[in-house]
Each structure stands twice: as structure tokens, then as C-alpha cells.
Amino acid sequence: MIPDLAQEGAAVEKEWVPESQAPVVMFNNVGKTYGRYQAIGGISLALSGGVTGILGLNGAGKSTLFKLLMGKLRPTQGEVRLFGTNPWKNPAPYARVGYVPENENMHDWMTAFEFVSTFARLHGLTRDEAKNEAERVLEFVGLSDVMHKKIGRYSKGMRQRAKIAHALVNDPDLIILDEPLQGCDPLARTTIMNVIRELGRMGRTVLLSSHILSEIERITEQIVILHQGRLLAIGNLHAIREQLDNIPHTIEIECDDAKALARDVLNLEVVHGLQFPSSSKLKIFTHHLGEFHQRLPKIIVDNEHNVMAINNPDDDLQSILKYLTGGVR
Amino acid sequence: MSKKERGETIWTSLDRKATAIAEFTMRQYRTRLSTWVVLGVGFLAISVVLLFYIDAMNTEIEAIDNDGDSVDWDGDGYVNGQEFKYGTDPLDIDSHPGLLDPSIEPEPASMYINEDDYDWDYSDASLISTGYDDDGDCRESQLLPSAQDGNSDGTPCNIILIYNAATDTYLIYADPNVDEDPDEDRYGKEAQHRAFILGVGKLGFVFLLSIFIPLFLATGLIRDEMTSGTMQYMTAKPIARGEIFLYRMLGYLAIVWPYLLVVCSILAIVSGFMGPGDQFFRFADLGVWFSILIAALLATLVYGMLFASLGVLWKYGIILALPIAAWELGMALLSMSVPDSSFLRMSIVGWSMSIIDSAAYLVWPDMDMFTAAGAWAGGSGEASIFFGTGNALPGYRALEWAQSDIGLGMGPYATTIVSMVVLLCQAAFFWFIGQLIFKSKEIV
Amino acid sequence: MYSAKTMSKDLIIETNALTKSYGPHVALDQLNLEVQRGATGLLGPNGAGKSTFFKTILGLIQATSGEGYVLGHDIRTEGLEIRSKIGYMPEYDALDDDMDAIHQVRYSGELLGMNPVVAMSRAHTAMEYVGLGELRYRPISSFSTGMKQATKLACAIIHDPELIIADEPSNGLDADSRQAMLDTLSNMVNTGNRSVLMASHLMDDVERVCENIVLLHKGKLAAQGRIEDLKAIDREIEIHVWGMANELEQALGKDGLEVRREGRMMRIRHDDEKTTHRILKCAADTGAQIRRMHEYEASLEDLFIVIMERFGYGVKSSEDLLASPAEARKVDAPESMGGSGA
Amino acid sequence: MTEEPTFDASAPITGKGRMDTAWGSDSADQATVAKPKAKTGQVFEQVYVPWEGTLNPRWMRNWAIFRHHVLGIIRKGHRPWGVPTKLVLIFVLIASMTDVALTLLFAVIGEPSLYELWGVGRNNLYAHVLGFFPRNMLFYPLVAALLVGGVISEDRSNGTSALYFSRPINRFDYVGMKFLAVATIQSLIIIGTLFLYYFADILSMGRGWAWILDTFPMFLTTVFCALLLIITYTSIGLALSSVSRGKFFPGIALLAVLLGTKTLAAIVEGLFDRSILYLLSPYDSLAHVGQALIGTNVMYNHPWIWSLVSVIAINAVSLYVLSVRVSSMEVTRE
């Protein structure tokens, strides 16, 4: 049931079975429709631990998924479980969750410090505890030098970080970030990515959505891919890629003497095709990417080839999404 | 992280959340210009009425000769009143007190204006014989003793006040020329003072402020946050939506209630010092002011809950709120004219106003008698004339407009308590409905 | 996509010591700019003054001092002429959610003085061009961000303007809609022979569409010129490693190579011809898989960070990231009376 | 990121599927797009079509704004007035026609005394436009509030002000046309029904020229008073709309101004018998002017010229606020 193997195009990573009895996040055949428009249709999913990127195009249902999880929407079918409890009309599990909504509007009239400490008190902290807590999380996201300034004066990146800070009070076990990098300039993006990676390193469960694939790639390899409200894939980026075995992987190698390299590579049984786009370029088709890459450096080094570049055009998130959504099966 | 130390009861943590959201809301409203504009305009409106009150208190009400005895009909130099007193003929130039022995000097006409004020204490009793003929034009006049006792109670030159339980009115049976020329200034100031307190309390505080302030401040309490999306932050915390609703409301009240307290106190103090009477400060009126404050506080609470719930219910909740406000205006006017109408039981303003009416009844038990006296106007008022309005004493009409009886048919204390309980129940009901809707709202 | 070679020397925007200040806050500081025909990217961190610059050259706000010309018109006096000749695509949503897309675009044409019939036919053309042909009768509220952006673009190009000013055209778009938006913009430059001035903080976008850039920082001109000229020449080799990354990193370090690592990705200083060989050797020794290896061309993003760091713009010092003060962000909205709408 | 578009020969490339994959539709029918055959990121034929036409002058642009707002009441494709607004407009339109209906009804019944009660006369003309209950307590202020509520502030919150100001439209035209459009819609309701009422009377009673000559000046005066009312309500409302961001604030504030000042003046009159405060109340000033001009009983103690001056002053202040706010209006989304 979790995850649903019957899902078309779904790929499952074995290690993702949660260790504890109740997974942090669980969706069981969850659907959500607005009128006649289906935002999410029959998603089954369970997640625990680590940083997970939720990928999808605009409108794929990422925000809807998070809002279902936060009890802001009521599922039209199926059940949602957050730490094993139903979050709809039940705020109790939020005590262990930090949620960063996509919405750009914030309480512009407050300072970041007031913002974070006020919302910390909703966790039941006293005034003093909340103040210490606010200082701690703002320091963590790197806003301690400006935390007494009005949020209205912040740039987008700082606003995002203030939002993240407010979600981090009370040390949540699960942090949900909806498009945290959107609209940020490179500097802010770098900082926020560092914060998220840090959280992952601290052992929190982090869910993060994005539509910019390279961003997720820089943060995590655990991904969930949504498309048109359907679960397309879940698991490790590369594992997913390897499950799509019927599509030959293409590897491009740029070297001095393509033919010579081809001769050495040809002996590998995982290679089932070769192509020479030019005299210094070699295209290799393989069924088993991992095994091929395992052996490739040794072949090159042993045979003293001079390789300028290795390119793997199929092995990025974008192309995976393309395969999955493009109906290649 | 001090997770371990937080082992207190659920109440302390609730309390923390409550103050957090309430403070948050207060601060949010404080930073908005619109809050201050709304509160400022409200204060301005009330102070305009106050200015008119101050002006009225500082203006001498022109004394009117109600019984017409300051004129000298026969032109003998003695005004009618003096001639009445000494029993001479006011129509005969050759009959005046100067011819009496000893000869009496003519008195100035001004002595015969307001020369015979009310001597009653307007006390509340079913049959009271009272009144004193200050200028002696009854006692000293040459009328027969039987004519001096026009109301046939056995005592000449007095007045009897009878409470007619059937019509709930006071009847005044006066002997001729007793208390026939009341002091307009004294009566008018007192009447205007009371009318001001009641009028500004009922229409100014309970209607104008208590409807428009919640309309501006409470309708968006939840709705604005939902449309701007900032509600996302709050609903993602471990706190029930009903609590959010309640605590936001607390924050709103924390702005509105002190504001009402301040405005009410300013008016109470100013009118206490400015008000008529010999005393330095009219302490007794504070009771009425207190009831006005209570009524306004409860009204803002109920309206706040109602409008906030409407805001949660529908994006265009304000459109639903407007007919309600119009209904309440109608009810406010109704409760001032027909206080026992059963329609009032279906309003908020009706219950609030009965709190003020009860307090007024307690503080000014003589109110009914007082208004009756204003209408009687020394015998020349509307009570003595069958049709038409006659000339009631100044201030009578304002008082009549502003005051009303307790409509519930219970004692003042019972009315106050019942009204307050009903208002609180209304607030709780609207809160319950509001949080129920809020709870099942999807926040997109 | 550096294919647009339709450059002519004439300038479309020229400013001379252009300054705009809001009280004590200087949003644009003595700006001397020359924008040529073709596609130009306007870069800068959030709050660098990009939007203010656009508003100033549109004649929507009065410059405090200095002068500027757009398509030969003075920005101080000929705002109406400028605005009939350019198409402006604002950064934020500027569409009425309850209208159908085609009507919104048509109305935007009518507002320029087209008569309703012409505006309608042009609206169809524009919608077709931006790729919303099939969706034009749908209400805008049902649109995704990408479609909304495309509708905004259609509104801006309905009267075939000489210059399109696009503020953050790809903001919030996913990869495919972003691609489509950028393709449309470069198509306008290449085949439509129009000029595009676009602001963005996604370096990739600018690189794909534009050949010139203007870099603003705190209202000052930080850099201006052709992208290729501005790029740094630090050469590195980027590898994507799969498995044994830590071991490989250590091995590379031991081998004397300078490694920067970000997760699965490593960048190694390109010292000489032998570098790639050394990398592969280390990989062979440790058993790490090198999924990708290529020469890393410094991107505009790096350039941006380099230039910003030259301004003392460290990533961690957030004081610098403070955007312009509130009065510059929303000049006339002093928590206005409509606070209730906030 | 070089991408080679891969064409699946068997796939029918529909525009819809293609667009949905390219733009990430979020409300497409599930069935149509669940398995798009075309690969994403495919570049389709884009041909830039230049346009050689010339743009019309200013009056045409202004006409477009006017048309957009007025036609929006009845037709799709123009300004989308909210459903509640339209419902209230219909309701008030019907409610304003009660006197038309009653005139016709009693003409049919033919009872002269009843007819006198409802037929055209000074008091009834006055009541149609300026009667406090229910017209000016519930109907007309509500219509003005709903129309005026979002007309400027919504542009500010939607960001559509950029649509106007990034085009060759100056602020005076922008506000002027909005003012005219809103006033026109109100006129359709108030003055339109007034005309109906008048003509219903002529038709149903078969009035002759003498009667028409007799009553026409009175009728024209009423129309003038109605215009004054519409202009005053609109300018106050637009001024409030220009200072605020929210959709509802201007509406409530307009009602608060109209009804609040009226209540306040009524308190002062009730308590201290002074009618001077009615000068502050837009409704009462208008009503006073109307009473004096139409010739019904004047219910105020001060001279009606004061009320006229007050109406003019209220309009002047509102228009001043409006012009100041709009000229400093920032082209941004708030």
C-alpha cells in the first residue's frame, strides 16, 4: 500500500520503508478535488526522515499536498496521517511540525523577532522561553543582525528565512517548506539552501517543494515527483533513473580518440550500442548505468585515454521528469 | 530549549497562547492607520455631542413667566403677582397694594418670573401631598379656603401627586397658583443633563460606536488574514481554530474596551463637573455612566463576534453585516419609543439599552415624576391642554426622547442581570457558530 | 542562445546622471546607462532599484534629477509617447482574475487606443503568439503562474511595441513554462526584430535571452556590457559523483587538487592537461562513479556573486540584503487607510 | 541545458495537450491531459506578427475605460463586478420601481384617492430620490458603496493599475472615467426609474400638455437633485476608495459617513434642538436642498443655501482628496 506499486510510472526505493511504526507523513489513496477540477488524485505515500524534495510543475499538486498535511484542506477521498493522526480539525500533531507556506504575504508590520517569538508562544512557550527560542532560530537562519527590523523592509530572501525561522521554533521533527527558494536572488538562495541542508544533517524530516530542478538537486537526492496530481515517482533520484531500464542510458564522452576508447568499452556486456557523432566524441548506450560508471574510470586510466568530458544527458531531474511525464514506459 | 521545564497544567499553556495571539492582534491593529482613523472619528463624533452639551450647560435658559403674573394689566405699577398676593384687583388701576395700610412698595416684575418653583422632591410614591406656595399667591390671596383647596384633599395650597398604575403615569392635582411658575433654568438644565447622558449613551455609545467600530475592526478579524494568506502561519501551530477565533477577539477587545472606557470616562467626568446642581461633582450619575460603559462593552463584544463570524462565513460577509446594522438602527429607535416591543428581544441593541434604562431607573427614581412635571409646566404645559403640545418646560422634550421605561417588565436589578446574561449568551452563541464555520473552512 | 546578431549601434535607452530618491533613501544613484537594440538583461539583487528604474523610464514616477531618453523621447515630458511605444510587463500579477484572458488582453489594447474590433483581432494574435491560443477563453483565475505570465506578455505586445520591458518574466515558473517564456522573448528579438529589456535575478534566464547585461546594485551601476566580456575566466572542471564521494574527495585532495564540493557535485581547479586524467585515476582507485565531467564555464550567477562580493556583499551579512526602505517599496501606501484590506 | 525535442510520430499534437504540458495547467480536465503524448519543452512554431495600425487618440482610450466599467454590469468580457454587487443592483432597481408599479396599479383600479397617494407630485418625486426610508437609508448608499468600493482600490490590490498607467493614460482621465462610469450606473437606477415613474403617470392617466407643462419643471428639478445626490455619493466614495487598499473599507466607510453623520445630527437635534449639525451630513444637506428646490415641506431650521454650500464643500473636499491620492498613486501591487 505504501507506496502504491500500482501507480503508473511509480518507482519505489526499498530503503524508504519507515523504521518506526508510524511514518511521519502518510497519505493513503488521498484525493482532493475543487469543484470539477482534480488537484490531487489517489496519492499513497509515506515518508520519514531526511530531506525530501517534492518535484512537479506548477499546479502539479505540491502545495495541495502540503495543505492537506497541515489540515488546511480536507481530503475528498482517502486518509492523511501526520505522525499517525488525522490532521484535519486536529491541531495536536502540529506541535511537532514547522510549516513554511508558499504565500509571500507576511505580517509586514512586525519585526522578525516579534514574529518568531509570538508564534513560538503558540507552542506553549512562556514569554522568556519564546524570546530565547526566537533568538536561537534567527541566529540559525542567519538573521540575527536584522531581527529587530520590520519584516516589511526585508528582501524576499530574508522574508523566506524569517518564515523558515518561525517554522523552526520548538524544534519540530518535520519541516515542510513550500517553494522556499522562489523569487530569491542567488545570494539568498545559497543561504537558504545551506539552512535546509543543515536541517537535514540535524536529522529532521524535511519536505521541500520546488519546480526548479537544479535547486532540489543541490539539496537532496530523495525526491517525490508529482504530475497532474498523480504520484509519478518516489525514491532516490538515481534509483528512479535505474528503474527505468527499458530506456537506454546515453553517455557522451569527449576524448582524443573516440574509436580507441570505443574498442575498450565494447567489451563490457552492459554496453549495447555505440555511436560516433564526431571523431572526438563517443556516445555509449547502456542498460546499466551504475555498473558501467563503476568500470569506466578504470578503463580510461588503464588504457591511458585522454578524456576531456563525460556527459550523461539523461541523468538529471529534468530529463527524468520528462521521461515520466512524456509517457515513456 | 527548555522542554523539560514546561510541565505545567494545560491552563497555563492555554493562557500563554491566549496572550500571545491577543497581543499579536492588538499590535497588528495598533500599526494600522485605519484603526486610529476609525477610533478617532468615533471619538470626534462623540465629542461633537459633548461640545453641544457643554454649550447648553453654559447657556442660561431664558426664564419664562409661565403663569403670566409678571405683567401689570391695569398699569398701576404693581404687577399682577403682587396684586394677587395682596388680594387686590389686577384689572383695576385703583386697586393695588400701595393703597393698603401700610402702603407697600411695588416690586420689580422680575421677582414674579420663576417666583414659584417646584418644591417637590419628585419622590416616587403613589399619593403624595406636597408643594409649597413660595410666593404666597395662593395662601395670601383672597380666595375662599375651599377655592384654595382646588384638589379637595383637605389642605389648601398644596399639590397631590398620584401614580396611576393603570396608565403608568403620574397625575398632578395642584391647587391654584401653587408651584405655578417653575424655574426653567433649573428644570431645563437637569432635564438636558439627563437627556444627554441617556441619549449619548444609547445612540452614541450603544448604537453608533458599538456598531461601526466592530463593523470596521471585527469583520476582517479572521477574514482579512484568510484572504491575504497570513492565516497560514497561525493555523499551522498546535492551536485549535476556535481558540484562534477567541483570542483574536480578545485582542480586538483589548483595543476597543479601553477605548470605550476612556471615552466614557471623559464624558462622565466632564458632565459630572459641568452638570447642574449645587454639588461639586455629580457622583450619582456615575452609576448611569457605568451602565453605559457595560452596555457598550457587551454590545461591542456581541457585534464583534457576530461580524467576525460573518466574515468567516463568506468573503462578502460585510454585505450580510449591513442589513443587520440597519435592523439594529431600527431597533435602537424602537427601543427608545416602544421599550417593551417584543421585536427588541431579537436584537442586540435592545438588550444593551435596557441595561442603561435600568441604571437610569435606579439612579434617578424620580424620572417619571420629573418628566411629568416637565410636561405639566406649572399648569401651563401639555397636561393642561387637551390637544396640541402646549408649552412644556425646556429640556422636557429631549428628556422624553432620550428616556424610556424598562421594557422587560422586571425590576431594574433583574433586568440588568437578565440583559447581561442574554448578551453574553449571544456572544457565546456567535462565537460558537463562528468557530464552527472557521474550523471547517479550507484555507487555500 | 547567443544567436541574436541583429545589433545596430543606435541606443534605445539612454540615461544621464539619472537619480531618484525617496526622502533620504536613494533608489537610483547617478545612473548613466546606454541600452542598445536587442536583448538586454537588467540584473541585481532584490531591491537594487530595477523596478524603480523601469518606472522612471516609463515616466510613471518623476526622476529627482538627471535626464533620460527612451526611443528618442524625453522621459520627463513625453511619458505618453513612450508608453504608446513600449510594452511593459510588470513583475507582480497585473491581471483581473475574474476576466477571461482574451478580454483582458483585448482591454489592454483598447486602453492604448485601439478600437474594439482591431484590439480583439490583435488579442487573438498575441495570445496565439505567446502560446495560449487554446486557452484564451478561460478565466484568468484558472491559470497557472506560467499562463498568467504569458497573458501579461500578451498584454504587453498587443500593439507591437518597439521595446518590451519585462520585469522578472520567469519568476515563479517551472522549467518548461520558463523555457517557453524565454523562447518567446528571444523569438521576439530574433525574428520579430524587437528589443527586450528584462530584469531578472535568475542568471540563467538572462544568459539565455540576452547578449548585454546591466548590473545594478543599490541603485548604482555595478557593471554594464556584453555578457561574454564580463565573464570571469576562472576555469574549473565539474564532476558529478555517484557513490564513494567522500573517499574521492579525500583522494583528490591528497593528489593535490583543489576541490569544492556541494553534495554530489564537485568542482576542481583546472590546472593543466593532466587534471582530468588525475581525477579519473582517483575515481578508479576509490571506485567512485563519475557520472558527468565537463569543463565548467563560469555562469552569470558566479559573475554576479563575484561582483556583489566586490561590493562587500557577503552572503551571511544580512544587513546588506535589507531591501530598500518601506517608503521605496510602496511609496504612497503608508499602511494606508485600507489597512483593513491587508 | 541543451534539449533535443523528441517527436513521437504517433502522438497527435493537440494545442491543448501541448500547452498544458508547457505551461503546467492547473485546471485542465484530468482525462485530457493525464498522459500527454507530446514531450514537454517542445518548441512550437512561433511567428511574430507585426502590426502596422495607428493608435487612436485620447478620447478613444477614455471611451474604452468608460465602456469597460459600464458594460461590465450587463455583459461578460468587461469589468467583472461581483455577483453580490449585481444582485444588489437588481434588487434596488426593482425596489425603486415600486412607485411605478403602484401608479400603474391604481390607474388600473381607478380609485382617485389612492391614485393621489401615489401619482406624480412634489412629495412623491422628492421621495423617489431623496426619501430617507428606505431609499437613502438602505438602497442608494448601498449601491454607491458597492459600486465605488473596489473601483480604485481593487486596481491597487490586483495590480491592474499597471495596466492603465503603463499605457498612455493620464491619471485625470483614469479617475474621471471611473467617476463617470460609476455615476452613470447609479443614474440608470435612480434617474432611469424616475423617468419611468413620470412616463408611467402620463401614460396611465392620459395626461394632457397642460399637466405636463405644469409638472415638468418640478420633474427637471428632481432630476437635478438626483444628479447632485449621485455626484456627491460618488465623489465621497471614490475619495474613500482612493485612500484605502481593501475592497470593503471604502464601502463601509461611505455608509458610515452617510448614516453616521445623520445619526449624530439626529442625536444633537433630539437632545439640544439644534439642526446645524445636519450640515455635516451629506444626505441631510442634499435633502434640504431638494426640499427647497422641489418645494416640499422644509424640515430643517437653517437656510437651505447653507446646505447647498455644504454639499459643494463636501464635493470639493472629496475631489481634492481624490486628486491628491490618485496623482501620487504608485504603479504597483499592494
Image (tube, rainbow, N blue to C red):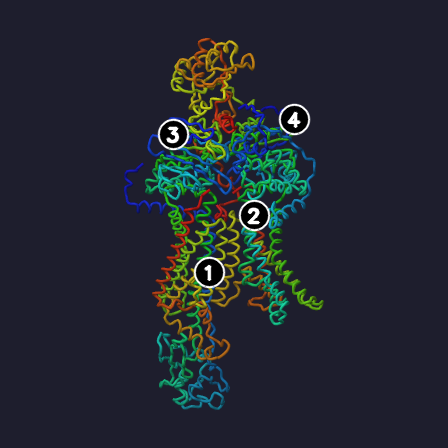
Residue linked to disc 3: A50
Image vertical order of residue A97 relative to residue C6, above or below: below
C-alpha distance separating marks 4 and 2: 43 Å
Q: What's the residue at 48%, 63% (across, down)?
A: B330
Image vertical order of residue B61 relative to residue B41, above or below: below
Determine whether label 1 and label 3 are within 8 Å by CB: no
Estimate the x, y position of residue B140 in percent, counting from the top left. Answer: 39, 86
Residue linked to disc 4: C8
Q: Residue furthest toward the right?
A: D209
C-alpha distance separating marks 2 and 3: 49 Å
Q: What's the residue at 46%, 8% (across, down)?
A: A303
Of the residues shown, which amino acid type is indicated by label 2? Ile
Q: Comparing marks 1 and 2, which lies closer to the viewer?
A: 1
Of the residues shown, which amino acid type is indicated by label 3? Gly
Q: Chain of mark 1?
A: B
Image vertical order of residue B335 relative to residue C204, above or below: below
- Nearer to me, A124 or A29: A29
Residue linked to disc 2: D152
Estimate the x, y position of residue D172 in percent, counting from the top left. Answer: 62, 47
Q: Secondary structure at mark 1?
A: helix
- Nearer to me, D149 or A75: A75
Estimate the x, y position of residue B400 in percent, counting from the top left. Answer: 45, 70
Which mark is on residue B328? 1
Count the numbered circles shown.
4
Q: Chain of mark 2?
A: D
